Amino acid sequence: MDGRAPELTPVERRQRSDHRAIEVGLDWLAEATRAAKFDIDAVRALVDLAARHYAAEEPFLAALAIADPKIAAKLRAQHDEALEIGARLIESLEAGGVTDTAYLSRRFLAMAQHNIIEEERDVFPLMERIAENQIRPTTPAETCFRSR
């Protein structure tokens, strides 16, 4: 390495861009939770944004499963849990449950942020190794890592 940050693949760029957008929503949700003032439409939009991002990551997770099946399964489980908590959060808002809403909001925040941190800290370096052919892809889905 020459000291410069590695060039991001298109997949990494899209994922990081999605992560930043989700984090903006998570920052809003954290403030809404502190103030106990929720906008159900904004919560729905945030959960939908996360769901669309997780769906877009499926080809990436399929490729990752070849190199590291445990980490791919772990990320899928995090996605599933975040979406389940998000759905319960929306239900709680619809029912007017203030106590449950705050609890579910904090859980959604924690899971979604934890997933972003793990992907960027642990998984993106693995993607880079795949892109550099240090780990040889064996399926067509894995070629998504090599797109530069």
Image (cartoon, helix red, strand yellow):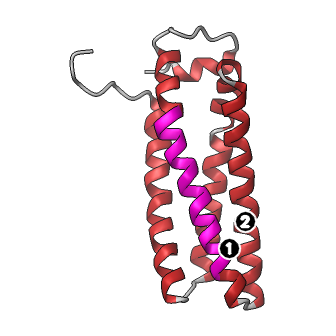
Element type where label 1 sits in the image: helix
Q: Is residue 120 magenta?
A: yes
- Is residue 80 depicted above or below 105 in this figure? above
Left/right of residue 53 with respect to residue 91 in the rendered view: left
Tag 1: amino acid: Leu
Residue at the disc numbered 1 = 104
- Residue 13 percent coordinates (x, y): 43, 37
Question: Looking at the image, which residue is at 45% across and 31% down?
Answer: 10
Residue at x 66%, y 32% (from the top left corner): 71
For this rendering, which residue is in front, 147 or 8?
8
- Please give the name of the residue rendered at 54% of the width and 42% of the height, measured from the top-left corner: 118
| Residue 76 occupies quadrant | top right
Q: Quadrant of the C terminus?
A: top left
Task: From the top left corner, tell me how far across and down residue 60 is, in percent.
Answer: 63, 31
**Residue type pointed to by label 2:** Ile
The answer to whether residue 53 of the structure is visible from this angle is: yes
Whichever of labels 1 and 2 marks the residue nearer the N terminus, that label is 2
Q: Is residue 82 left or right of residue 128?
A: right
Chain part drawn in magenta: 102-122
The 10 Å Cα crowd at callout 1, few under 14, some 14 to 19, many 20 or more, is many
**Dominant SS type (magenta):** helix
Q: Residue at x 54, y 81 (%)?
A: 33
